[in-house]
Image: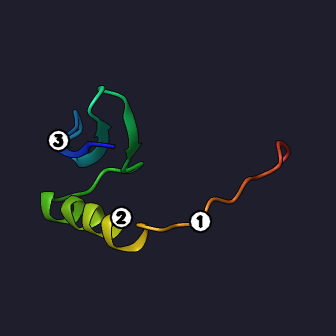
């Protein structure tokens, strides 16, 4: 899989990131805006560092 993190400024002036597959589909996003570009970058670094082998928890429909 080939994917790229995109770091951008939203309409409200907050910084966000999204992980985009080479086919253009968004795989993941920050889910929140960050006040600075540096904080958004730290969010990207955190995902890279803390979730390379994250387990998958399958939740029931009612959860």
Q: Which of marks 2 and 1 is nearer the N terminus?
A: 2
Q: Which residue lies furthest to the front in this view?
A: 1
**Cα gap from disc 1 to disc 3, whole angstroms:** 31 Å
10, above or below 36, in the image: above
Q: Name the image quarter holding residue 11.
A: top left
Q: Residue furthest bottom?
A: 50
* Disc 3 packing (10 Å; few <14; some 14–19; many ≥20): some
Q: Report which residue position mark 3 lands on.
A: 9
Which SS class for mark 1? Answer: loop
Residue depth check, mark 3 versus mark 2: number of the one nearer the observer: 2
Residue at 36%, 51% in the rendered image:
30
Q: Report which residue position mark 1 lands on.
A: 55
Q: Which mark is residue 47?
A: 2
Which SS class for mark 3? Answer: strand
Quarter of the figure that contains the N terminus: top left
Residue depth check, mark 1 versus mark 3: number of the one nearer the observer: 1
């Amino acid at each position: 899989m080939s994917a790229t993190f995109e770091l951008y400024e939203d309409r409200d002036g907050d910084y966000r990131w999204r992980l985009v597959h080479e086919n253009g589909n968004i795989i993941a996003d920050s889910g929140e805006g960050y006040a600075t570009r540096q904080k958004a970058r730290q969010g990207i670094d955190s995902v890279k560092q803390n979730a390379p082998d994250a387990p998958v928890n399958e939740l029931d429909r009612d959860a």
